[in-house]
Image: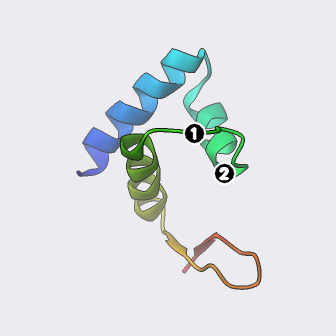
Amino acid sequence: MKIKGAMTILNKRAKFYGKTFDELIEMIDNDNGGMETFNVYTAYEIYKMDQGYYWHGENFQTWVRK
């Protein structure tokens, strides 16, 4: 999946919830999204990497900028 496909999935999920794209990303960032589908989480990861983030995972950090 590339960024275009990831954005399509995330925009459709935001529309499904009746939220904006930014609200959806914040919801997933805060893990308030509950159980999302594998495709939504994959699209979210691709979006974050496209924005210059990478997964850190130490000291309770998650996505950090390079």
In the rendered image, which residue does mark 1 sit on? 35
Q: Nearer the viewer, residue 34 or 64?
A: 34
Residue 33 appears left or right of 8: right
Mark 2: give few (<14), some (14-19) or many (20+) Cα within 10 Å: few
User: At 34% across and 43% down in the image, what residue appears?
Assistant: 6
For mark 2, give the secondary structure.
helix
x, y percentage for residue 27? 68, 39
Q: What residue appears at the point 50 percent right and 17 percent down from the top-left corner?
A: 15
Q: Position of residue 51 (x, y in %)?
A: 48, 59
Q: Which residue does the image show at 40% across and 46% down from the upper left? A: 38
Amino acid carrying label 1: it is Met
Q: CA distance from mark 2 to mark 1?
A: 13 Å
Amino acid identity at mark 2: Asp
Pair 2/1: label in front: 1
Tag 2 and tag 1, C-beta contact below 8 Å: no
- Left or right of residue 18, residue 61 in this image: right
* Residue 35 x/y as whole percent: 57, 39
Q: Residue 5 bears which disc, if any?
A: none
Query: Which residue, as the protein is rendered here, is positioned at the far bottom?
Result: 58
Q: Which residue is mark 2?
A: 29
User: x, y (%) of residue 32?
Assistant: 72, 40
Residue closest to the eye, 53 or 43 = 43
Please tell me how crowded label 1 is: few (under 14), some (14-19), or many (20+) other residues with Cα within 10 Å: few
Element on which disc 1 rests: loop
Looking at the image, residue 1 sits to the left or right of residue 28; the answer is: left
